[in-house]
Amino acid sequence: MNSRSGWWIVFVKEVRENLRDRRALGMALLYGPLFGPLLFAGLTSFIVGKQLDDAEKPITLAVIGVEYAPNFVDFLQQQGVTLKTPPKDPEAAIRDQSEEVVLAIPSDFGADWLAGKPARIELYVDGSRQASRGAIQRVRGLLNAYSGQVAQLRLQLRGIDPQVSAPLQVVRHDLSTNQSRGATMLAMLPYFLILCAFLGGMYLAIDTTAGERERQSLEPLLINPVSTTQIMAGKLAATTVFALASVVSCVIAFKIGLPYVRADELGVLLTLTPLASVLIVLLVAPIALMAASVQTIIASFARSFREAQTYLQFLMLIPAIPSLLLAVNPIKATSWMLFTPLLSQSLLINQLARGDSLAPLDIAMSIAGTLAASFVAALVAVRLYRGERLALAV
């Protein structure tokens, strides 16, 4: 075996063997890349459909004490609200979820109204229930609309211009676009893409270390007249190729699937332009090498394929950390963040999802920082291959 082409021979060998493994091939090019887009499309379509249904369906409201405020009740009915028999115990009805909102009008409502005092209305809700928030917001909107309408009439009856009660005129200039509003729904896009990089090469990383050790084929490989660096380079290259192929497949799946999500009915555009798709692959590509190197390092300490698989399953949680951090606390990118692997990709992919352009320097910083970490991990993996413990069962 020529030492100069040793890494290439190892690379071809590992690629061929992995292509014969249907489970590994399916994880790299099918299950992993399709999991994210299908999960995203399903959840987003469900959320959009529910929001549209909640916005279009008529409001059915339980009102206690309708006889104390006939004009207010007429206003509700004019707005399309259907009144129903109120429960005897509104608090119990809210707790057992038989009612989403219960409105109670006290007996002193009319007296306060005629005296020009603020008339009290009690609203029973459970703001912690996600399913009830739409109904609560709609009822509160009706109450605010009626309160504002009556306030203007009272001022006019007293000869006062209603504009006096509004000393400020706020003119809102919303610079968001349909695509930038859709970036909120695409907040987990970086996680799915980075996860594909880790899933794509996972089985090959395990097979080239713990798998070969378990089959007792690693020691004969290491005694060949080829440096361990060449062998490691070929194995890492093969693992990286499958990880990168998984990323490309995932981007293509998102590119094809996003237009079929019904987000446009909410005035939101979910799309990835061809340029954005290419830039995403370019940004995530260095993570493929980093994932291959880190997975190889971890798998080298396992005694068997199953043990290595158990260790690497915990590694799948790491790609979620930056995406969850940005979803909870959105931040503006700074220089040190752009050099940080995983975090920089999450920040820049979110910008692409918004339709924003990326500065070439930002892209270069992200790639450089991730490649530096990847090369360090690759050197550690090579060093492990030089040790005798890797070839021996421990």
Image (cartoon, rainbow, N blue to C red):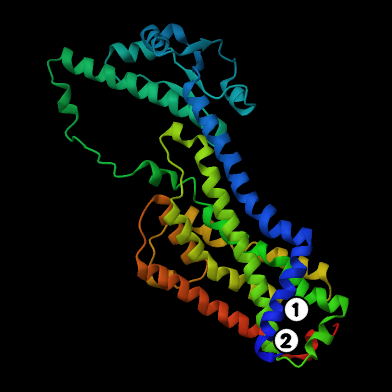
- Picture quadrant of residue 385: bottom right
Q: Residue at x 15, y 15 (%)?
A: 158
From what the image shows, is residue 384 above or below residue 166?
Answer: below
Mark seen at residue 360: none
Number of the front mark, 1 or 2: 2
Near-viewer residue (27 or 130): 27
Which one is nearer the viewer's eye here, 385 or 161?
A: 385
For the residue pair 172 and 131, the one nearer the viewer reads as 172
Secondary structure found at label 1: loop
Residue kind at label 1, given as amino acid type: Ser
Tag 2: amino acid: Tyr
- In the displayed structure, 121 sits above or below 336; it is above
Provide residue 246's location: percent of width, then percent of height. 62, 60
Give x and y (percent) for residue 218: 81, 82
Residue 119 rendering spot, x and y as whole percentages: 35, 19
Q: In the picture, residue 257 is in which quadrant?
A: top right
Dot 2: element: helix
**In the rendered image, which residue does mark 2 sit on?**
385
The residue wearing badge 1 is 300
* C-alpha gap between disc 1 and disc 2: 9 Å
Q: Residue drawn 83% across and 79% down?
A: 213
Q: Residues within 10 Å of mark 1 (few under 14, many from 20)?
A: many
Horizontal and vertical percent position of residue 159: 12, 15
Cβ atoms under marks 1 and 2 closer than 8 Å: yes
Q: Is residue 302 visible?
A: no
